[in-house]
C-alpha cells in the first residue's frame, strides 16, 4: 500500500522530468540538424625535419576548427592540390558531424581508389573532422572511441650503429630512458643498410648508385641480434625491420634463424607484392611478424588478418585514409587476435602521432607504438604534442587531439626546392638491379 501511494505521489513529477528530458533530446536533435558546416579546407606544408602536410578545416562557427595529418613525405607536393583543388570545393558547406559519410563520399569521388595521394589527402580531412568533433564535445577523441583501455601506450624506437658495440651502447641508452622495447638495426660496410650507416669504403659495383646485397645483410644482422640478446638479456624486447629488401625465401629462412632469440617481432619480411609468402612463413616458424606500413588497400591487410598470418598490423594511418578506416582495421584485428603497431616515424606529423595514440588508448588489441619525444622545435610549432616518459607515450587530454598549430611559426619552415623533394633514392644490387625498399 505504501509503495503504491508513494508511486501515485511522485508519478506526476517523474512524468514531468521525463517529458523535460525528452524535450531536451528533441532540442538537441533539432540543433544537430543545423550542425556547423565546413567553411574552408586548407593544407599547411611544414618542413621541420621532414616534409609534413597538415590539413586545417575551419567551420562557420567562430573559433571551431580542427587539424589532421596528410603527410606523404615522398610525394608531398602532390598532396597540396589534392586537398585544396579537389577535396576543398567538394567539401565546402558540408556538415562537420557526418564523418563516416564524408569519408565515404571523398573516397568514392575520384572513382579510382586506394592511391596513396588520395588516401593521405582524405586522412587530413578525416582527422580534422574527428578533432572538431572532440572540440565540440569538449572531450579528447579517445573518449569518442569508447574511452581508455590503458593509461598510456608502450613505445619503441630504433638504434642504428655501424658496428655491434655501437648498437649495444645505443640500446642501453634507450633502456636508461625507460624504453622496454628497442628496434635494433646495423650498418653493412660499404653498403646501404636500412636503419644503419654503411661505413668503410663503398663496395665496388657495376653502377654508381647505393648498393645492397641480401647475404651480407642477413649474416651481419643475425650475428648482431645474437650478441645483443646475449649481452642485454631478456629484460628488453627486441625488434628488427627487414624493410622487405631480401628475396622471400631468404626472409623465411631468416625468420627461422632468429626464432631462438625471441624477438618481439620481425618487421616487413616481405613486400606488399609478395604477401602470399606469409602462409609459408607461418608454416615454417613461430617468429612474430609485423606488416603493413606500405599498405593502402583493404585487399592487402584483410587476408593477412583474417587468416592470422601476422601478429601485428602496422599500417601507416594516413596512408590508409585516417582514423575512420584505421579504427575498423583495429576492430578487425581484435576479432582475429592481431594487435596494432601503427607506423610512427618522423615523417608523420605530431597531429598524426596524436591521432594514432588516441586509437592506441581505446583499442583492446593495442600492441606497441613506434614513437619518441618530439624535439623542442617541433613542440613549439605543434603545441600539445604527445609526451614520452618511462617507456610510454602519453596523450594530451585536451578536447580533440589536444594539439594546436602555431601557423605563424610553421610558416618559417617552408618546403625546400630541389633534390628529390623527400623522395627515396634507388638502391641496387651489385649488378644494377633495383631492389624494393
Image (cartoon, rainbow, N blue to C red):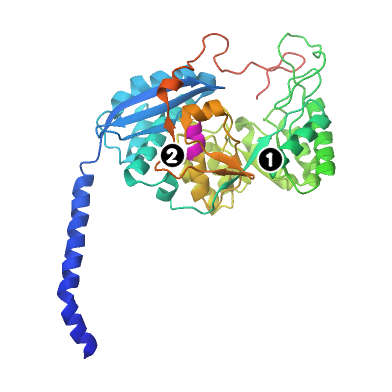
Residue 178's x, y, as percent? 68, 43
Q: Few, some or many C-alpha atoms within 10 Å of disc 1 (few <14, some 14-19, many ≥20)?
A: few
**How many marks do you count on the picture?**
2
Residue underneath mark 1: 177
Please state the horizontal and vertical placement of residue 347, each as a whole percent of the image: 55, 27
Q: Position of residue 303 (x, y in %)?
A: 56, 43
The residues colored magenta run 350-355
* Front residue of 31 and 432: 31
Relative to the observer, which residue lies in front, 97 or 134? 134
**SS category of the residue bearing label 2:** loop
Q: Is residue 318 left or right of residue 399?
A: right
Residue 207 in the image: above or below residue 48: above
Image quarter in which the C terminus is found: top right
SS for tag 1?
Answer: loop
Query: Which tag, 1 or 2, sits closer to the chain's start?
Result: 1
Instruction: Write down the residue under mark 2.
Output: 402
Measured from the top left, where is residue 361 in percent x and y? Answer: 51, 48
Q: Is residue 334 found left or right of 142 in the rendered image?
A: right
Q: Quadrant of residue 368?
A: top right
Amino acid at each position: 500500500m505504501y509503495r503504491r501511494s508513494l508511486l501515485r505521489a511522485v508519478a506526476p513529477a517523474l512524468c514531468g522530468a521525463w517529458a523535460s528530458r525528452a524535450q531536451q533530446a528533441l532540442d538537441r536533435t533539432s540543433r544537430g540538424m543545423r550542425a556547423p558546416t565546413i567553411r574552408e579546407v586548407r593544407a599547411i606544408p611544414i618542413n621541420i625535419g621532414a616534409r609534413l602536410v597538415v590539413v586545417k578545416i575551419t567551420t562557420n562557427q567562430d573559433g571551431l576548427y580542427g587539424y589532421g595529418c596528410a603527410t606523404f613525405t615522398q610525394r608531398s607536393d602532390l598532396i597540396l592540390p589534392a586537398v585544396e583543388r579537389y577535396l576543398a570545393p567538394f567539401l565546402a558547406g558540408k556538415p562537420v558531424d557526418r564523418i563516416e559519410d564524408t569519408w565515404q563520399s571523398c573516397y568514392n569521388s575520384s572513382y579510382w581508389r586506394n592511391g596513396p595521394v588520395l588516401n593521405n589527402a582524405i586522412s587530413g580531412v578525416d582527422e580534422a573532422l574527428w578533432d572538431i568533433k572532440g572540440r565540440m564535445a569538449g572531450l579528447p577523441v579517445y573518449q569518442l572511441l569508447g574511452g581508455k583501455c590503458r593509461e598510456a601506450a608502450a613505445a619503441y624506437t630504433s638504434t642504428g650503429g655501424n658496428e655491434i658495440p655501437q648498437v649495444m651502447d645505443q640500446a642501453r641508452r634507450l633502456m636508461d630512458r625507460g624504453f622496454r622495447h628497442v628496434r635494433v638495426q646495423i650498418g653493412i660496410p660499404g653498403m646501404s643498410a636500412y636503419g644503419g650507416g654503411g661505413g668503410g669504403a663503398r663496395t665496388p659495383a657495376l653502377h654508381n648508385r647505393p648498393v645492397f646485397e641480401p647475404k651480407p645483410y642477413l649474416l651481419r644482422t643475425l650475428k648482431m641480434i645474437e650478441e645483443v640478446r646475449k649481452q642485454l638479456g631478456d629484460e628488453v624486447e627486441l625488434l628488427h625491420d627487414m624493410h622487405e629488401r631480401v628475396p622471400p625465401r631468404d626472409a623465411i629462412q631468416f625468420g627461422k634463424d632468429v626464432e631462438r632469440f625471441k624477438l618481439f617481432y620481425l618487421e616487413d619480411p616481405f613486400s606488399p607484392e609478395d604477401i602470399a609468402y606469409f602462409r609459408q612463413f607461418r608454416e615454417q616458424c613461430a617468429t612474430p611478424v609485423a606488416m603493413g606500413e606500405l599498405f593502402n588497400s583493404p585487399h592487402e591487410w584483410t587476408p593477412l588478418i583474417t587468416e592470422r598470418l601476422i601478429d601485428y598490423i602496422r599500417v601507416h594511418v594516413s596512408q590508409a585514409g585516417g582514423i575512420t578506416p584505421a579504427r575498423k582495421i583495429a576492430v578487425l584485428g581484435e576479432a582475429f587476435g592481431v594487435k596494432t603497431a601503427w607506423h610512427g616515424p618522423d615523417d608523420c606529423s605530431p597531429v598524426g602521432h596524436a591521432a594514432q595514440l588516441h586509437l592506441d588508448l581505446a583499442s583492446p588489441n593495442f600492441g606497441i607504438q613506434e614513437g619518441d619525444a618530439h624535439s623542442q622545435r617541433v613542440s613549439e610549432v605543434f603545441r600539445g604534442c604527445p609526451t614520452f616518459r618511462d617507456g610510454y607515450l602519453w596523450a594530451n587530454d585536451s578536447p580533440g587531439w589536444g594539439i594546436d598549430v602555431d601557423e605563424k611559426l610553421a610558416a618559417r619552415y617552408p618546403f625546400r626546392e630541389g633534390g628529390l623533394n623527400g623522395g627515396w633514392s634507388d638502391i641496387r644490387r651489385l649488378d644494377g638491379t633495383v631492389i624494393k625498399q
